[in-house]
Amino acid sequence: MSKTLILFRHAKSDWPEGLGDHDRPLAERGRKAAPVMAKWLAGQRYKPTVALVSTARRTQETWALAAPELGKIVKRDAEDIYEAPVGRILDAIHGVEPSVETLLVVGHNPGMEDLAQLLMKDDGGKAGARLRQKFPTAAIAVLSLPVEDWTIVTPRIGSLEHFVTPMTLTNP
């Protein structure tokens, strides 16, 4: 048995004057990219049943634009993954019940990139090389984890199945 972990970095955000980081909205480019990335994900064999979504406005907006493409998914607001280091994101993942086969995490960098690299048991081939070069906004990393329970997800356990960015979908 194995689990699938999908790491989805929030789409491109704006930097309006006078707003704190937590309250930053998506930029126009981000509002366009989020549903495109979700549509790609929906076209794959991965069907997440739970989504952990950072409470930041830009991740919430990314989720809101992606969710209609993804079908029925239980959304859980996860304050602990806002701008979180790898350990805190991994703690949130460890808290997911074992019955969840495919988990989607909508979060921030550097946490998304660092977690993907931490979990990869090898270099990930061409997709891994692209991931190590840059994990841009709206990017999605899909990892296969040979575990039966999220509590035993540990470093160097997973295989990178896909690393997709808005650019790779528009310029294959």
Image: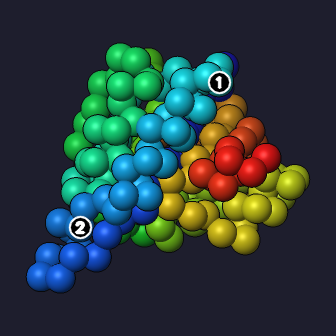
Q: Name the residue: 66% across, 69% down.
A: 134
Q: Position of residue 50 (x, y in %)?
A: 38, 28
* Nearer to us in this view, 45 or 160: 45
Q: Name the residue: 40% across, 18% down.
A: 71
Secondary structure beneath dot 2 equals: loop
Residue 6 seen: yes
Q: Label 2 belongs to which residue?
A: 24
Amino acid found under the numbered disc labelled 1: Gln
Residue 54, compared with residue 16, is above or below; it is: above
Q: Position of residue 139 (x, y in %)?
A: 57, 53
Q: Residues within 10 Å of mark 1 (few under 14, many from 20)?
A: few
Q: Position of residue 93 (x, y in %)?
A: 42, 44
Amino acid found under the numbered disc labelled 2: Arg
Q: Which mark is residue 44?
A: 1
First in sequence: mark 1 vs mark 2: 2
Q: Residues within 10 Å of mark 2 (few under 14, many from 20)?
A: some
Residue 118 seen: no
- Residue furthest toward the bottom? 17
Q: Name the residue: 14% across, 76% down.
A: 19
- Mark 1 vs mark 2, CA separation in Å: 30 Å
- Residue furthest toward the right? 125
Residue 130, compared with residue 103, is above or below; it is: below
Secondary structure beneath dot 1 equals: loop
